[in-house]
Structures are given as C-alpha cells and as structure tokens.
Image (cartoon, helix red, strand yellow):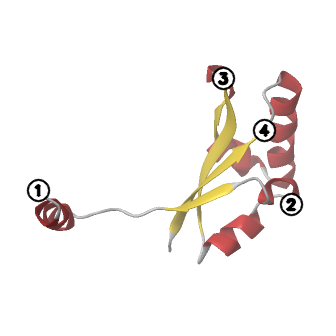
Amino acid sequence: MPRFLVEVPHEAEPAACARAAKVLLEIGSHWVTNADFGCMDGEHRAWIILEGESKTEVRNMLPPVFRSVARVVGLNKFTLAQMEQMLKAHQA
C-alpha cells in the first residue's frame, strides 16, 4: 500500500503544542505515539507516516482541523539499479 509523510504545522506557543497533541490523542492514542513532534527544537509541527490509496484518502484520515494545513507527500524507495540508472542518465 502507498505510504505518505504527513506534516501538520501549528502555532509556535506552548498552548498550541498541547492543543495539537490533544486533537491527535482524541482520535486515537496511536496517532500521538506514532507522530514525531519538532516542538522541543522550535519546529512547531508533527510528522506521521500513514498508508492509504491516495493523498486524498490520507488527508481525509486527519482530523478536520488539520486537513487544510497538512502537507501530504507520497513516499517511495529506489532500488540500487534505479539509482544507478538515474545517476547514469543525469551525468554531465
């Protein structure tokens, strides 16, 4: 199944960090335990990897309050052969 990196920003204030965590906790503790937060390093956003058939499906898994601000990025892996082919194709 396709995998997506979801990035959800929030305001840079302690109360906003707590609200973001609370919203995720309310939809299921697995969201908070699987999310990575950057708040302690000044990056006020959370990242989580989700599986779904499309970006739209993954976006719709998010709480409504986060859907419009979330960034959803499709992830892929390259084989060594694919990497060698790309490097060969782009050598100057």
Left or right of residue 56: residue 16: right
Question: Which residue appears at 80% of the width and 53% of the height?
Answer: 66
Compute the Cα span from label 1 to label 4.
42 Å
Kind of element beneath mark 3: loop
The answer to whether residue 35 is seen in the rendering is no
Measure the alpha-carbon separation of dots 2 and 4.
Answer: 14 Å
- C-alpha distance separating marks 3 and 2: 25 Å
Give the residue at mark 4.
Answer: 10
| Amino acid at circle 4 | His
Q: Amino acid at mark 1?
A: Ala
Q: Earlier in the sequence, mark 3 or mark 1?
A: 3
Judging depth in this view, the residue of 29 and 4 nearest the camera is 4
Q: Name the spot of residue 33 as percent of width and height, x first.
A: 67, 42
- At label 3, the amino acid type is Gly
Task: Return the mark for residue 22.
Answer: none
- Residue 87 x %, y %: 15, 59
**Of pointers 3 and 2, the one earlier in the residue sequence:** 3
Q: Position of residue 69 (x, y in %)?
A: 76, 53
The residue indicated by pointer 2 is 64
Q: Are marks 3 and 2 in contact (CB under 8 Å)?
A: no
Which residue position is annotated with label 1?
92
**Where is mark 3, residue-wise?**
42
Earlier-in-chain disc, 1 versus 4: 4
Look at the picture and state if 91 lies above or below 44.
below
Label 1 or label 4, whichever lies nearer to me, is 1
Query: Closer to the observer: label 2 or label 1?
Result: 1
Q: Residue at x 71, y 54 (%)?
A: 70
Mark 2 crowdedness (10 Å alpha carbons): few <14, some 14-19, many ≥20: few
